[in-house]
Image (spheres, grey):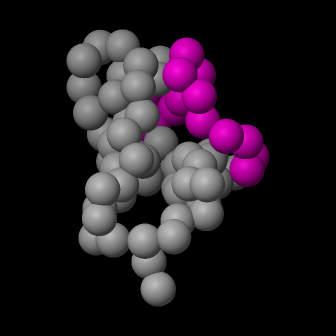
Amino acid sequence: MTTLIHQATKAPVQIGDALTDLRGDSAVVASIEAPRKPSSTGRIYTTDGMGYFPSVFGCTWIGRTDRG
């Protein structure tokens, strides 16, 4: 199962979580889009309507089966 985690804590990222980006700004997770193909990183969408690469918040996917 593909799961988005916060790299520092290894905790799964869930809707409603408050995350801090690389600049120190906070955002609340509204939805999460898993990668659709091997070259994709997926997205984290926040309550302010913005979409971000997971790395902006120090997050990564584990359990991906679409990469060799």
Out of 22 and 18, give the one closest to the viewer.
18
Question: Compared to 65, does 56 lie above or below?
Answer: above
In the image, the segment drawn in magenta is 9-25
Task: Say if 46 sits above or below 33 in the image.
Answer: above
Instruction: Find out whether residue 23 is within the magenta segment.
Output: yes
Which quadrant, please, contains the N terminus?
bottom right
Residue 57 appears at what percent x and percent y?
Answer: 47, 42
Is-magenta flag for residue 44?
Answer: no
Residue appearing at x 53%, y 22% in the figure: 15
Please tell me whether the stretch drawn in magenta is mainly helix, strand or loop: loop
The residue drawn where x is 60% and y is 36% is: 13
Left or right of 31 on screen, residue 13:
right
Q: Which one is nearer the viewer's eye here, 36 or 50?
A: 36
Query: Looking at the image, which residue sits at the far bottom?
Result: 68
- Residue 12 image position (x, y, % from top left): 67, 40
Outermost residue, left side: 50
Q: Residue at x 46, y 23 (%)?
A: 29
